[in-house]
Image: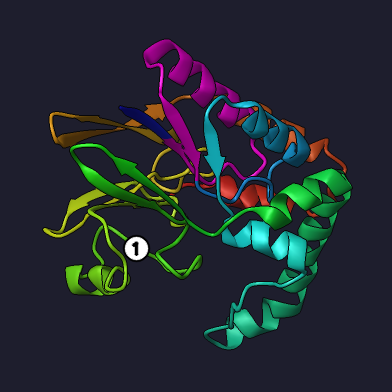
Amino acid sequence: MRLAMLSDIHGNLHALEAVLADLRAYAAPDRTWVLGDLCLIGAHPAECLQRVRELPQVQVISGNTDRRLVTGQRSHYRPKDAEEWAKFAGWLTQRDACHNWTISQLSYTDYEYLAALPPEIELHVPNYGWLLGYHGAPGNDEANLLPDTPADEVLDYFLDREGRFGVGGHTHIPMDRDLGTWRVVNLGSVGLPKDDPRAAYAIATFENGGVQVEIRRVAYDVEAALTALAQSGNTAWQWAAENFKHA
């Protein structure tokens, strides 16, 4: 069984189309999981949502930004010093403008779809066991499971779950860690990768009781995505464009 896994598209249609083209050329998945953060930031929120909904054998969950769009909630960011505090009002203005513009691009049908998305997904693979998909971590769509997060802290999130393979996104940084009782994978990001200018997604192939995971990197036209953002009508496009910078 072959499972394609994508996360954190963030309204970046250029990156999404490049990833889907790579997937079509490279592998024919039996299923596709999309693990949240579909619309916010990029120039094409509605178009990305439509492309995701058109995928065959696809299952989709909500990410933290999807939740914010449909509930009006915002992140719990707090300034860490006086310098950040002095910039905080301006940052809030730009952030809210980006959220509001994204909402204006979505139809009520889009809203209903996003509002109905579950926070997690499960799948039993014969001869392997249970898989668990989430956005940040099980039970927390804003948790950051990073390559250097201590193993015991990662495993704490899985204490009340049964399974052996957990996969999520949110951090925009890929990882693949075998922690004994759990294999924990982060897909990175399709639309806003932090570690590399190329889009990221993953393919898991289950056979003979085991699994092979390949995290694939796909080049796309970043400048075209930024140009589309500048021409989108989003008054906070420059704020949004900052998210395209890489570590």
Relative vertical location of residue 184 with respect to residue 214 in this rendering, above or below: below
Residue 184 in the image: state x and y as whole percent: 26, 53
Figure coloring: rainbow
- Among all residues in the image, which is located at the extreme top? 25
Q: Secondary structure at mark 1?
A: loop
Q: Residue at x 15, y 36 (%)?
A: 210
Residue 243 in the image: state x and y as whole percent: 59, 51
Amino acid type, label 1: Leu
Relative vertical location of residue 74 with respect to residue 137 in this rendering, above or below: below
Label 1 crowd bin: few (<14), some (14–19), many (20+), radius 10 Å = many
The span picked out in magenta is 5-34
Q: Residue at x 22, y 53 (%)?
A: 164
Q: Quadrant of residue 86?
A: bottom right
Q: Quadrant of residue 67?
A: bottom right
Relative vertical location of residue 137 with respect to residue 234 in this rendering, above or below: below
Q: Residue at x 23, y 46 (%)?
A: 129
Residue 60 in the image: state x and y as whole percent: 56, 44
- Does residue 89 appear to the left or right of 161 in the view shown? right
| Quadrant location, the N terminus | top left
Q: Is residue 106 visible?
A: no
Residue to which mark 1 is pinned? 145
- Does residue 181 appear to the left or right of 173 in the view shown? left
- Does residue 101 appear to the left or right of 53 in the view shown? right
Asked if residue 205 is among those painted magenta in the image, a careful observer would answer no
Residue 135 in the image: state x and y as whole percent: 47, 57
Asked if residue 26 is among those painted magenta in the image, a careful observer would answer yes
Q: Is residue 175 visible?
A: yes
Relative vertical location of residue 77 with respect to residue 65 in this rendering, above or below: below
